[in-house]
Amino acid sequence: MRRYSPRVFRFASKFFRQRSLVEEAAQEVFLKAFTELGSYEGRGSMEGWLTRITTNTCLNLLRSSKRRPELVASDLTDDETAWLDSNLAGAAMERHQKSERSLVAADLAGRVLETMTPDDQLVLTLIDGEENSVKDVVDVTGWSESKVKVQAFRARRRMREAVEKLLSRKKDEL
Amino acid sequence: MKDKLIDRHIISLIESGPLASLSESDLATIRVHTDHCSDCLGAFQAAQVSAILLKERASEVFEPSPFFHTRVMANLRERQAQGTLAPLWTLARLWRSAGALASTMLATVAALSVLTFVIPGNELGPASQPVTSLVHNYSAEEVILDENAQPEEPLSDDQLLTSIYGE
């Protein structure tokens, strides 16, 4: 458990922004792993097996939690508004890549993601956020390749539309 | 009409994969198009902001606390005590796995035995004759001088012609 817990925590961190939720998910993962140890038949790595359990556990926890309604510009904090303004001023990719990671952006990302379905959150976080391949997502979810591709395409569109709405409302306010 | 098609194309290009995976030529096409299309410019900016947000989100990682393992073990014991987990579940599971392993090994040994002892005996029957003949009590003289050979009866001319040309 000591060996694998950092990996399980890292993976669960992609789904939850509160430490308590990440820990709850990780605890559930290890309890499930102990219970289902017999189903691990040595096929594939133990890490892969635990990652699949982590994915399922996190998805189930996300599904059981209530989805947040649409995020509107008036819900944004001052910091989030300022962050969006600075990015609107010139959204050149190169500039953003050089910019420092910001806690405000991570908070805002979490809030936007919370308005989306757990499946959308999963593919966006793993593929667009973590730069995993479609095959990696197939491995951890057990979904078909076409399902992952379609899910990612639609999730990307929904995320873009949600952000576009925030940005356009910001522009209207300005 | 043409512009509509181009717009759709740009948006589908933006959504086709992670923004970071777009090639230079894709980005150039997007830039050229967004110079005169405000709708696509808005979509592209939103896609860029989304990409940054997701990257920032992915960079956040929690590490397990020092008490995490103790907590999990305590929870495990508690569940065992409540009967949520069977007390001997580990042994039962291990036995099931070991049973499967043992039966697989047994089947492999049986298959190898069949391959080693049964199949060669059948397939190499005629070839093994010289080997079995070694156990007979033939002396070297008997073999070389062929003393035990039955004397052949001389063939008549008719028998000889029949054996050569057939009936």
Image (cartoon, coloured by chain):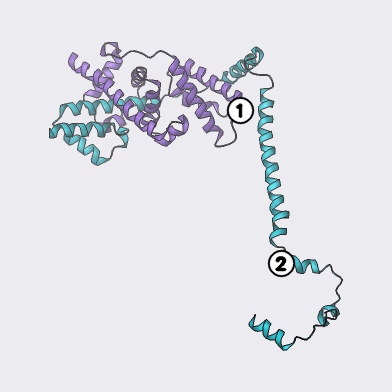
Residue A83, image x, y percentages? 28, 20
Give the chain coloured cyan. Answer: B
Q: In terms of image quadrants, where is residue A166? A: top left
Q: Quadrant of the N terminus of chain B?
A: top left
Chain on which label 2 sits: B
Foreground pick, A115 / A171: A115
Residue A131, image x, y percentages? 38, 33
Q: In terms of image quadrants, where is residue B24? A: top left
Give the chain coloured purple. Answer: A
Foreground pick, B143 / A48: B143
Residue kind at label 1, given as amino acid type? Leu
Per the image, the residue denoted by label 1 is A37
**Residue B127: which disc?**
2
The answer to whether marks 2 and 1 sit on the same chain is no
Q: In terms of image quadrants, where is residue A136? A: top left
Above or below residue A143? Residue A114 is above
Foreground pick, A164 / B151: B151
* A1 horizontally vs B154: left or right: left
